[in-house]
Amino acid sequence: MGAGTATIRVTVNGRPESLQVPVGLTLLEMVRDSLGLKGTKEGCSAGDCGACTVLLNGRPVNSCLVLAVEADGHDVTTIEGLVGAGGGDDTGNDLHPVQRAFLRHGAIQCGFCSPGMIMTAVGLLRANPHPTETEVRTAISGNLCRCTGYAKIVQAVMEAGRMMSLPGGEGGRGRGNH
Amino acid sequence: MATTSTLTAVGRPFERLDGERKARGQALYAADIELPSMLHGRLVRSPHAHARLLGVDPSAALAVPGVVAVLTAKDVPGRNAVGSRGVQDQPILVTDHVRFLGEPVAMVVAESVAAATQGTAKVKVDYEPLRGVFTPEEALAPDAPALFERGNLCHQARTRRGDFDAARRQAALVVTNVYRTPMVDHAFLEPHAAVARPDGGDAVTVWVTAKTVHPMMDEISRILGWPKEKVRVIAATVGGSFGGKPEIPLGCLVALAAVRTGRPVKMVYTREETFQTSAKRHPYVVRLTHAMAADGHILGLHADITADAGAYTTESRAVVGRAVGHCAGPYYIPNVDVEGRAVFTNNPAPGAMRGYGVPQVAFAHEIQMDIIAARLGLDPVEVRLRNVLKPGLPTITGQPVLEGVGAEACLLRIRELLAAEDATDPCPPQGVPDRNGELLGWGVATFYYGNGRTAVEDVGRARIRREADGSFTLFVGVPDVGQGSDTILAQVACEELRVPWPAVKVISADTAHTLETGPSSASRVTVVVGRAVQEAARRMREFLDSGGGADWRPGDPLPEMAAEYRTDSTSLDKNGQGSPYGTYTYGVQAVKVGVDPRTGKVAVRKVLAAYDVGPIVNPLLFQGQVEGGVTGGVGYALFEGIRLTEGRVANPNFHTYLLPTALDSTAPVLAETVESHDGAGPFGAKGIGEPASIPTAPAIANAIHRATGGRFFELPITMEKVYRALRR
Ligand code: FES
Ligand code: FES
């Protein structure tokens, strides 16, 4: 194991951080262990399951495959940074529209895949606000879920896309907020 | 659909209670728990599947900076043997006899995971490798090396009734086939993890990922040689179970390490460790002989079932016990001779997995039914209808089927649905591609599944407290493993208390606060625990209605009600006769597949299901269980399988052990329920967790046959197998 450490500057969930990290540290370890953000999960450490997905400059990555030093100078969003980012609704609910859609559709069972799945969906909808079902399925095909059979996840992502493109933009303030 | 229209909480598609915490990333799974001055454990594991352990020398490991302790079998103060259901034959750290590859021989405890990992490489272990046995046939050979003094036969069970030989002599048709099913992994997304914290010098709290906490407490207390009151076990948020979890040695090891070091200890398995060393679904070889009358009635069934139990007993007795009682399928068969056995090998030990020995036998009996139908010139649904269990008829264990059972109604409904499909979207004849170049076919499979533990009185317990603010807290011993049991049980409580949703909060699976109530498995939670919840809620409502608690003042103890529910199942006699379950779930799935004749690739196009599952407590969660269960069944049917080479898992990660992805699982799943009135659960409900996935694999096998003419007797039915069959 390399003995070296490096100092990196990253913006995590909108907050600038300066961290001294071992050069071999993964972004997943940085998020979970150095920053204590436990919402991002570790399912395989090999890039196979997607449970560790975070957004790096807005694009979904498997954080177990990225080194922390590679994130130097970049912007990282984890599940904890999502609330509020999509704007609240009129009931004061600060969940992102994708999170809300996952709940409404029953797309969460054990929940272990959910943070990664939600981050992948948010990344997809930013790049492609009106995905087809096949595009949704392709986008989440690197995120394994053993519980749901995916149908409700796909429905949730499609609905979130529709909500977010209503007046109010990504704010997705939903019905009654014109 | 059974009616729940007068109910206000039961039957409603409420969002799950823990959903928002999970969506926010705030739910704490065991690996997420951080405690001050916490240490980390890693295991030294045997590279041999079968060996004598001659010695362990930890000195070099102890010299690694950060390493605090190295534990071996000598450090276990109590009895170094754990297990489930009364058979304790597995050491948490090997004493002298290694029985499977990856078995732990020492635990390194260090300030960091990295230091612990470095330490494991420095522990010197001496082994004398022994010849191993890796199949039940090898293990039962006369000269086979024995895993245990009592030999390699782990367990044997029978079901006998009537006179099979006489039935065979009368039969117009006798059909015998041998079916093989692979070892598969639960593949829950959350790997095993546990955290222990010493509480003073004489107590310990352990967080586990588990389907049950009280047995874990029992095992830890025996390992430590402590009274149970000194051990508190709490289920953290559980990242999927499907029958698996807890990993008992893991919970015991962190507890032991915490007690030894006086500091909190966490240990998390890698995905590879989870694949190599934790429980799986048993591989089976099932030989079935059906003796048939010319009119399509089954006269008799002979079955011989062999399960690979791996290196330790774990749940093998109960898994085989369930298989010998379910191997006929939901049919009336007067003459039955069934023998099943579990055999020790030097493979990783399978345990409980969704369906508990039944998916394997369902694969066999449902393909048999299709073969029989073809030989007799009958429609596959028709041959099932002629034999399906009806009220008053006995199962093969002699349990009379209750009034109100809808097994036949499920078949009739599926026949209607298939006729409608055939009218609107007919499949071309066998072997003829449709306009997209695909071979198409429907296949059906039926099943039944006893709810609750087999042939033991199954006990559910629950407690309800009214809080100062007028809300209620429900205490139940079973964890929500992701299936939504907290939500289901809260709906039952709300309904019975007649309070608006969600006025009930749930505290589950904490041995300090909840009563022992069995595991979150065997499709028993809704039925067995649900009844106890209903009863506790009823008592609370009556207490409050009669003015109880009206004079409550701050400082008084809060009003509480507890209740217990016992199933009226009985034990089985030596012929396996008796009433082993209070209630059965029945059902039928029909699956349409499309097969690409150029590649042999099979795609599931549509799934229709009809269940006799009583009223649905939460339609959203029900549909989720069915979709997830079907998807698991698709993996089991088409590609999943642990590949073992001399006890080593050759595919211990998700790039070699493939799971269905969102691109594989695209078929709509249309599940209906039929009216039924026999459910023992609250408001007549039954369990769906396991039944959801049992019929999928045989239905797919039957559909592939309909599409291609190829018959498959072994799972998984890989693309390559289908391709080869198409070339024959
Ligand atoms: S933990 Fe990163 S892909 Fe599985
Ligand atoms: S909800 Fe359990 S893995 Fe997806």
Image: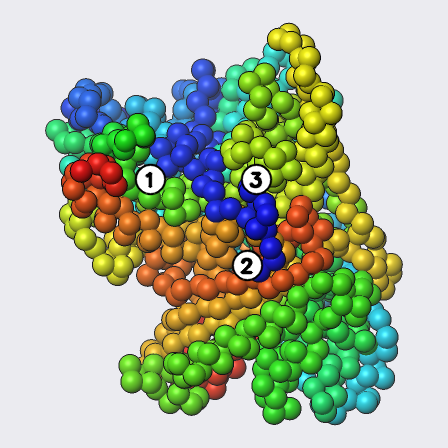
Q: Residue at x 75, y 74 (%)?
A: B332
Q: With A53 as the anchor, is B220 left or right in this view? A: right
Percent x, y of residue A175: 25, 41
- B236 to B622, vertically: above or below: above
Q: Residue at x 48, y 36 (%)?
A: B17
Residue neighbourhood size for the residue with mark 2, other residues' Cα within 10 Å, grouped as few (<14), some (14–19), many (≥20):
many
- B689 to B501, vertically: above or below: below
- Marks 2 and 3: which is nearer the front? 3
Residue under label 2 = B692
In this view, the residue farthest toward the top is: B555
Marks 2 and 3 sit apart, C-alpha to C-alpha, by: 21 Å
User: Callout 1: residue from which chain?
Assistant: A
Label 2 CB sits under 8 Å from any ligand 2 atom: no
Image quarter of residue B381: bottom right
The reply to whether discs 1 and 2 touch (Cβ–Cβ < 8 Å) is: no
Of the pair B451 and B95, the residue shown nearer to us: B451
Marks 3 and 1 sit apart, C-alpha to C-alpha, by: 21 Å
Q: Residue at x 77, y 43 (%)?
A: B566
- B405 to B525, vertically: above or below: below
User: Callout 3: residue from which chain?
Assistant: B
Q: Residue at x 72, y 71 (%)?
A: B389
Marks 1 and 2 sit apart, C-alpha to C-alpha, by: 27 Å
Residue under label 3 = B491
Of the pair B348 and A133, the residue shown nearer to us: A133
Residue neighbourhood size for the residue with mark 1, other residues' Cα within 10 Å, grouped as few (<14), some (14–19), many (≥20):
some
- Marks 1 and 2: which is nearer the front? 1
Quarter holding the C terminus of chain A is top left
Residue neighbourhood size for the residue with mark 3, other residues' Cα within 10 Å, grouped as few (<14), some (14–19), many (≥20):
many
Q: Secondary structure at mark 1?
A: helix
Q: With A175 as the anchor, is A75 left or right in this view? A: left
Question: Which amino acid type is marked by label 1?
Answer: Arg
Residue under label 1 = A100
